[in-house]
Image (cartoon, rainbow, N blue to C red):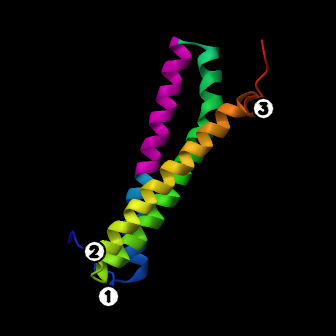
Amino acid sequence: MSSKIDLDNAPIRSTFFQYLIPSVFAMTIKALFIIVDLMFVGQGVGVAGLGAISLTVPFFVVSAALALMIGLGGATIMSVQFGKGNIEEGQRVFEQSVLFFLGLASVLIAMSFYWLDEIVALMGAEAI
Protein backbone atom coordinates (compact mmCIF):
# COMPACT_ATOMS: atom_id res chain seq x y z
CA MET A 1 0.00 0.00 0.00
CA SER A 2 1.35 3.38 -0.98
CA SER A 3 1.85 5.99 1.75
CA LYS A 4 0.62 8.73 -0.59
CA ILE A 5 -2.98 9.31 -1.54
CA ASP A 6 -3.57 10.67 -5.02
CA LEU A 7 -6.47 13.00 -4.32
CA ASP A 8 -6.80 13.94 -7.98
CA ASN A 9 -7.31 10.43 -9.35
CA ALA A 10 -8.21 8.14 -6.41
CA PRO A 11 -11.81 6.99 -6.02
CA ILE A 12 -13.70 9.09 -3.49
CA ARG A 13 -15.02 6.08 -1.54
CA SER A 14 -11.62 4.51 -0.87
CA THR A 15 -10.05 7.89 -0.08
CA PHE A 16 -12.87 8.60 2.37
CA PHE A 17 -12.27 5.32 4.21
CA GLN A 18 -8.51 5.89 4.27
CA TYR A 19 -9.19 9.03 6.30
CA LEU A 20 -12.22 7.70 8.22
CA ILE A 21 -10.76 4.53 9.73
CA PRO A 22 -7.80 6.17 11.54
CA SER A 23 -10.06 8.97 12.79
CA VAL A 24 -12.63 6.57 14.25
CA PHE A 25 -9.85 4.47 15.78
CA ALA A 26 -8.32 7.54 17.43
CA MET A 27 -11.68 8.67 18.82
CA THR A 28 -12.32 5.17 20.20
CA ILE A 29 -8.94 5.11 21.94
CA LYS A 30 -9.61 8.58 23.39
CA ALA A 31 -12.99 7.41 24.74
CA LEU A 32 -11.33 4.37 26.34
CA PHE A 33 -8.77 6.61 28.04
CA ILE A 34 -11.59 8.76 29.44
CA ILE A 35 -13.39 5.69 30.78
CA VAL A 36 -10.24 4.37 32.44
CA ASP A 37 -9.53 7.80 33.93
CA LEU A 38 -13.06 7.87 35.36
CA MET A 39 -12.53 4.44 36.90
CA PHE A 40 -9.34 5.59 38.62
CA VAL A 41 -10.93 8.81 39.88
CA GLY A 42 -14.00 6.92 41.11
CA GLN A 43 -11.86 4.42 43.01
CA GLY A 44 -9.36 6.96 44.34
CA VAL A 45 -11.40 10.10 45.05
CA GLY A 46 -14.96 8.87 45.00
CA VAL A 47 -18.24 10.56 44.22
CA ALA A 48 -16.91 14.11 44.66
CA GLY A 49 -14.20 13.51 42.06
CA LEU A 50 -16.67 12.08 39.56
CA GLY A 51 -18.98 15.04 40.16
CA ALA A 52 -16.13 17.48 39.54
CA ILE A 53 -15.24 15.70 36.30
CA SER A 54 -18.85 15.75 35.10
CA LEU A 55 -18.91 19.53 35.63
CA THR A 56 -15.70 20.10 33.65
CA VAL A 57 -16.28 17.75 30.70
CA PRO A 58 -18.70 20.11 28.87
CA PHE A 59 -16.09 22.89 28.97
CA PHE A 60 -13.47 20.51 27.62
CA VAL A 61 -15.74 19.34 24.81
CA VAL A 62 -16.70 22.89 23.78
CA SER A 63 -13.11 24.12 23.83
CA ALA A 64 -11.91 21.07 21.88
CA ALA A 65 -14.69 21.58 19.31
CA LEU A 66 -13.80 25.25 18.87
CA ALA A 67 -10.10 24.46 18.60
CA LEU A 68 -10.76 21.78 15.98
CA MET A 69 -13.15 24.02 14.05
CA ILE A 70 -10.73 26.94 13.91
CA GLY A 71 -7.64 24.75 13.50
CA LEU A 72 -8.98 22.56 10.70
CA GLY A 73 -10.56 25.48 8.88
CA GLY A 74 -7.34 27.49 9.13
CA ALA A 75 -5.24 24.51 8.09
CA THR A 76 -7.43 23.93 5.04
CA ILE A 77 -7.17 27.55 3.91
CA MET A 78 -3.43 27.55 4.66
CA SER A 79 -2.92 24.37 2.60
CA VAL A 80 -4.81 25.85 -0.33
CA GLN A 81 -2.62 28.96 -0.19
CA PHE A 82 0.54 26.84 0.03
CA GLY A 83 -0.69 24.80 -2.95
CA LYS A 84 -1.10 28.02 -4.93
CA GLY A 85 2.44 29.03 -4.01
CA ASN A 86 1.32 31.84 -1.68
CA ILE A 87 3.57 30.93 1.24
CA GLU A 88 3.28 34.31 2.99
CA GLU A 89 -0.51 34.27 2.70
CA GLY A 90 -0.63 30.73 4.11
CA GLN A 91 1.55 31.75 7.04
CA ARG A 92 -0.66 34.77 7.65
CA VAL A 93 -3.74 32.52 7.76
CA PHE A 94 -1.97 30.27 10.27
CA GLU A 95 -1.07 33.22 12.50
CA GLN A 96 -4.62 34.59 12.31
CA SER A 97 -6.08 31.20 13.23
CA VAL A 98 -3.85 30.89 16.30
CA LEU A 99 -4.49 34.47 17.41
CA PHE A 100 -8.23 34.14 16.84
CA PHE A 101 -8.43 31.00 18.96
CA LEU A 102 -6.32 32.54 21.73
CA GLY A 103 -8.58 35.60 21.78
CA LEU A 104 -11.74 33.49 21.73
CA ALA A 105 -10.42 31.23 24.50
CA SER A 106 -9.53 34.27 26.61
CA VAL A 107 -13.03 35.70 26.23
CA LEU A 108 -14.66 32.35 27.05
CA ILE A 109 -12.46 31.87 30.13
CA ALA A 110 -13.24 35.39 31.37
CA MET A 111 -16.97 34.82 30.83
CA SER A 112 -16.76 31.48 32.62
CA PHE A 113 -15.15 33.06 35.66
CA TYR A 114 -17.63 35.92 35.71
CA TRP A 115 -20.72 33.66 35.45
CA LEU A 116 -19.24 30.61 37.21
CA ASP A 117 -22.06 30.15 39.73
CA GLU A 118 -24.75 30.44 37.06
CA ILE A 119 -22.97 28.01 34.73
CA VAL A 120 -22.46 25.43 37.47
CA ALA A 121 -26.11 25.76 38.55
CA LEU A 122 -27.21 25.43 34.92
CA MET A 123 -25.38 22.11 34.72
CA GLY A 124 -27.24 20.79 37.75
CA ALA A 125 -24.82 21.31 40.64
CA GLU A 126 -26.20 22.34 44.00
CA ALA A 127 -24.52 24.12 46.89
CA ILE A 128 -23.71 22.01 49.90
Residue 88 found in image quarter: bottom left
Amino acid type at image mark 2: Ile
Position of 55 with respect to 64 (left or right) is right
- Nearest to the observer: residue 61 or residue 36: 61
Would you say the residues marked 2 and 3 are in contact, meaning their CB atoms lie under 8 Å apart? no
* Point 41% across, 50% down: residue: 26
Residue 98 found in image quarter: bottom left
Q: Nearer the viewer, mark 2 or mark 3?
A: 2
* Image: 114 above or below 21: above
Q: Secondary structure at mark 3?
A: helix
Residue 87 is marked as: 2
Would you say the residues marked 1 and 3 are in contact, meaning their CB atoms lie under 8 Å apart? no
Most extreme residue toward the bottom, as rendered? Answer: 9
Which residue is under mark 1? Answer: 9
Q: Is residue 41 magenta?
A: yes
Position of 89 with respect to 74 (left or right) is left
